[in-house]
Image: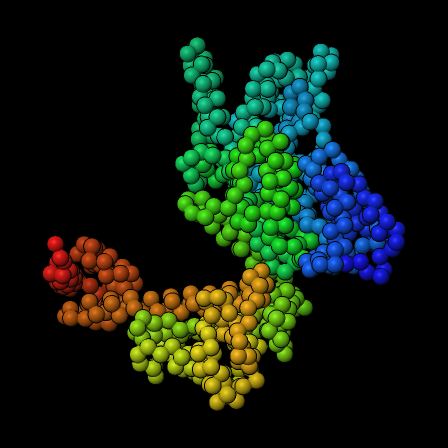
C-alpha cells in the first residue's frame, strides 16, 4: 500500500534493495527509526510491506509513517537475527517489541581473567566474560551470590590479576585470605588449574546443576579425610551442608532431570508480560518476569519470537528444552540460532498432554497474575481506560464505555439446588465486594429461562428501589433464550435501554437483543477475552454456591435422625470436619472435641453413620450383577 506521501526516492530504494540476507531500517519524516527488521532476502521482504493486499493492522499503520529505508547486509539469516536484536536494544523503535527497562535487569558476571571475579552487574561488556541472567528478582539473586561466596573462596578484590602483576608481587594478601574467604591467587597460593576448576563449579551451580557441585565437594571431603586432613574435610562438609540445604529448598517438578525453560506470555492491549520458569535437573530453581513494550499491534506468536530472541541473546546457559504457551514465528530459524550458540540440540514446543502441561499451567497462572497486577495499577488512575473496554464499546457499538459490567449465571442439577450468581467488573477488573448470590425461589423443575428472569428481576427491582447505580452493560451466560427472558424483565422494569448481551459457551457467540443473528468476534479480540473472563468468573461463583448448598443438604439429611443433634451442633460438625466421610472416619475422642458433642452423642453419631454406610453398601451389593 503505497501512499501519496511516499517519496520517489523511497520507491527507488525499495526496487534496488539488495537480495542478500540482512536488516532493513525504516525511518519517519523526522529521520527517527520506527522499525527494524531482518530478512533472508531484503528486497523481497521490504517490497512485501507495500503490497496492496496487505491487511495486517500493524503493517498498514507502519507503512503510513515510512519516509526512508536503509539496509545492512549480513552473511546469513542468523547473523541478521543477531544484528536485528542488537539494533532493537539500542534504538527501541516505535513498532518493535522490547523489554521494558531492560537495562536495569541484573546479571551474574564471571570475568575473563586468569583468576576470574564473580559479581552482580547491570552492564554487559563484550570482553569474553560469561553472563548468567537476566534476573528479575534482585533479592533472590543477592541470596544466590551470598551462597556462592560462602561455598567458593573466590577473590573479591578488583585487581586485574595477570602473570605480570602476580610476578611483580605488588598485591598483598588481604583479610579475605586470613579468614579463609579467598585462597590467595595474587600470591600464587592457588594454581590457575585449581582456581579454574572452582570457577567451573560456580558455572555449574549458576546453571542449576547443584548435583555436580555437591559431588565436587563430596570428593574433596573424602580425599581430605583419607590423608587425615580432618580440618579441611570439616570445611568441605560444611560447604556440602549449605549446598544440600539450598538444593532441598528447590521444588521437584519432573523426574527426567532435563534442563528446560517454561515460558508463558500474556497480552492485554498495549501491555504484555512474559514469565520464565527455570527448571534444572528436574527442579524449579527460579522464576523471572519480564514486561514488554511495543506489543500493541503484534500477536502472541510474534511477541514470542522477539522475546526468545532478546532473552537468549545474552544468556550464557541454554536449556535443551523450551516449553512455550504459543509457538513463535520463525520457529525453525530461532531453533537453528540457539543450536548454533549451544552446539547441542534444542527443542521448542507447546506440550498438549502429560506433566509438562502442568508446568505450562503454572507459568500461565503466574503470567496472568503479573498482567492483572499491572492492569490493576493502571486502573487505579482516574483517567485510565483499559483497551479491552474500548474494544468492547467499538465491537458491540455500545452507547457508553462499559466501565461497570454485571454478569449472571444459573447453576442446578435437574432443577435441584438451583442458584443464581451475579458478579461485578469495574474498569475490566473484578470487584468481589459487589458479588451477589441468589437461591431460586419461584421456579420449580428445569427451567433455566425462568430462573434467569427471576434473578434479573430480584437484582434490578432492589437496585431501583434503593436508588443504586445501574451497570453500563449486563452480561448473561447463555444464548437467545436466556437473553430474551432477561430482556422481558428489563422492559417490565422500564430498563429497556440498558445494554444487554448473552455469551453462549459452544461457539463463543455473542447475542444482542436487537439482532437476530449472533455476533462472532475474533478469538484474539480483547473484547471477547474480557467477556469470556467475566462469564467464566460468574460460572465459577455460581458453581461454588451450588456445591455449598448440595453439601449442606447431604450433610443435614444424614444427621437429621440423631437424637440430641440440633442445627447448631450440625453446623459445628460441618465447620470442624467439612464432610460426612471425615466425620465417619473420626474417632469418638475427635468428635468430642467439637463444642456441644459429649461422649453419648459422639457414640450415637458413630452408630448412625455406620448404619447408613452399611445400608448404602447393602443397596450397592444388591444391585451388583456378578
Position of 250 compared to 188: left or right?
A: left
| Percent of width and height locating residue 347 | 53, 38
| Percent of width and height locating residue 307 | 63, 45
- Nearest the viewer among 228 and 281 is 281
Give the residue at x 62% y 31%.
Answer: 340
Looking at the rendered image, the quarter that the C terminus falls into is bottom left
| Percent of width and height locating residue 409 | 43, 72
Q: Is residue 176 above or below residue 356?
A: above
- Nearest the viewer among 116 and 297 is 297
Q: Is residue 33 visible?
A: no
Position of 309 compared to 578: left or right?
A: right
Q: Is residue 319 above or below residue 601?
A: above
Q: Is residue 216 above or below residue 359?
A: above
Give the residue at x 47% y 70%.
Answer: 504
Looking at the rendered image, the quarter that the N terminus falls into is bottom right
Tell me the quarter of the picture where residue 41 sits: top right
| Percent of width and height locating residue 428 | 57, 67
Q: How many marks?
A: 0
- Nearest the viewer among 143 and 342 is 342
Amino acid at each position: 500500500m503505497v501512499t501519496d506521501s511516499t517519496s520517489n526516492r523511497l520507491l527507488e530504494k525499495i526496487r534496488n534493495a539488495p537480495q542478500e540476507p540482512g536488516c532493513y531500517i525504516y525511518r519517519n519524516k523526522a529521520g527517527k527509526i520506527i522499525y527494524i527488521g531482518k530478512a533472508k532476502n531484503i528486497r523481497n521482504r521490504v517490497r512485501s510491506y507495500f503490497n496492496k493486499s496487505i491487511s495486517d493492522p500493524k503493517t498498514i499503520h507502519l507503512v503510513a509513517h515510512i519516509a526512508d529505508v536503509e539496509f545492512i547486509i549480513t552473511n546469513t539469516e542468523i547473523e541478521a537475527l543477531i544484528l536485528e536484536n542488537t539494533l532493537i536494544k539500542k534504538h527501541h523503535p516505535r513498532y518493535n517489541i522490547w523489554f521494558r527497562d531492560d537495562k536495569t535487569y541484573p546479571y551474574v558476571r564471571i570475568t575473563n581473567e586468569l583468576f576470574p571475579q564473580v559479581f552482580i552487574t547491570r552492564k554487559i561488556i563484550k570482553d569474553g566474560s560469561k553472563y548468567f541472567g537476566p534476573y528479575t528478582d534482585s533479592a533472590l539473586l543477592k541470596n544466590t551470590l551470598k551462597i556462592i561466596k560462602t561455598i567458593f573462596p573466590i577473590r573479591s578484590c578488583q585487581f586485574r590479576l595477570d602473570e605480570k602483576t602476580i610476578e611483580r608481587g605488588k598485591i598483598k594478601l588481604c583479610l579475605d585470605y586470613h579468614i579463609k574467604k579467598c585462597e590467595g591467587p595474587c600470591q600464587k597460593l592457588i594454581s590457575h588449574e585449581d582456581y579454574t576448576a572452582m570457577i567451573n563449579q560456580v558455572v555449574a551451580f549458576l546453571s542449576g546443576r547443584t548435583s555436580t557441585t555437591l559431588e565436587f565437594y563430596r570428593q574433596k571431603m573424602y580425599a581430605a579425610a583419607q590423608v587425615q586432613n580432618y580440618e579441611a574435610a570439616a570445611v568441605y562438609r560444611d560447604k556440602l551442608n549449605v549446598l544440600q540445604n539450598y538444593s532441598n529448598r528447590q521444588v521437584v517438578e519432573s523426574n527426567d532431570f532435563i534442563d528446560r525453560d517454561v515460558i508463558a506470555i500474556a497480552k492485554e492491549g498495549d501491555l504484555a508480560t512474559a514469565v520464565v520458569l527455570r527448571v534444572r535437573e528436574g527442579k524449579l530453581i527460579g522464576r523471572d518476569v519480564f514486561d514488554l513494550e511495543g506489543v500493541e499491534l503484534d500477536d502472541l506468536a510474534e511477541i514470542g519470537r522477539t522475546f526468545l530472541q532478546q532473552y537468549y541473546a545474552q544468556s550464557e546457559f541454554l536449556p535443551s528444552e523450551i516449553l512455550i504457551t504459543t509457538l513463535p514465528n520463525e520457529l525453525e530459524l530461532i531453533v537453528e540460532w540457539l543450536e548454533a550458540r549451544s552446539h547441542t540440540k534444542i527443542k521448542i514446543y507447546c506440550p498438549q498432554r502429560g506433566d509438562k502441561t502442568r508446568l505450562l499451567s503454572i507459568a500461565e497462572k503466574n503470567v496472568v497474575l503479573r498482567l492483572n497486577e499491572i492492569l490493576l495499577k493502571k486502573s487505579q488512575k482516574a483517567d485510565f481506560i483499559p483497551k479491552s473496554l474500548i474494544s468492547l464499546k467499538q465491537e458491540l457499538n455500545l452507547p457508553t464505555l462499559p466501565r461497570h459490567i454485571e454478569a449472571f449465571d444459573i447453576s442446578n442439577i435437574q432443577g435441584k439446588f438451583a442458584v443464581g450468581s451475579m458478579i461485578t467488573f469495574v474498569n475490566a477488573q473484578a470487584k468481589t465486594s459487589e458479588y451477589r448470590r441468589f437461591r431460586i425461589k419461584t421456579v420449580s423443575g428445569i427451567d433455566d429461562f425462568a430462573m434467569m428472569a427471576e434473578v434479573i428481576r430480584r437484582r434490578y427491582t432492589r437496585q431501583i428501589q434503593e436508588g443504586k447505580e445501574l451497570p453500563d452493560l449486563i452480561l448473561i451466560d447463555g444464548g437467545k433464550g436466556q437473553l430474551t427472558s432477561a430482556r422481558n424483565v428489563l422492559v417490565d422494569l422500564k430498563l429497556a435501554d440498558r445494554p444487554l448481551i448473552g455469551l453462549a459457551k459452544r461457539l463463543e457467540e455473542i447475542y444482542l437483543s436487537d439482532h437476530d443473528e449472533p455476533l462472532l468476534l475474533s478469538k484474539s479480540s480483547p473484547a471477547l477475552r474480557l467477556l469470556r473472563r467475566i462469564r467464566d468468573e460468574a460460572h465459577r461463583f455460581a458453581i461454588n454456591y451450588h456445591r455449598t448448598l448440595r453439601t449442606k443438604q447431604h450433610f443435614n439429611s444424614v444427621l437429621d435422625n440423631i437424637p440430641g443433634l440440633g442445627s447448631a451442633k450440625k453446623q459445628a460438625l460441618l465447620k470442624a470436619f467439612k464432610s460426612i466421610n471425615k466425620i465417619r472416619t473420626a474417632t469418638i475422642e475427635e468428635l468430642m472435641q467439637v463444642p456441644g458433642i459429649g461422649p453419648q452423642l459422639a457414640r450415637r453419631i458413630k452408630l448412625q453413620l455406620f448404619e447408613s454406610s452399611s445400608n448404602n453398601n447393602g443397596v450397592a451389593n444388591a444391585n451388583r450383577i456378578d
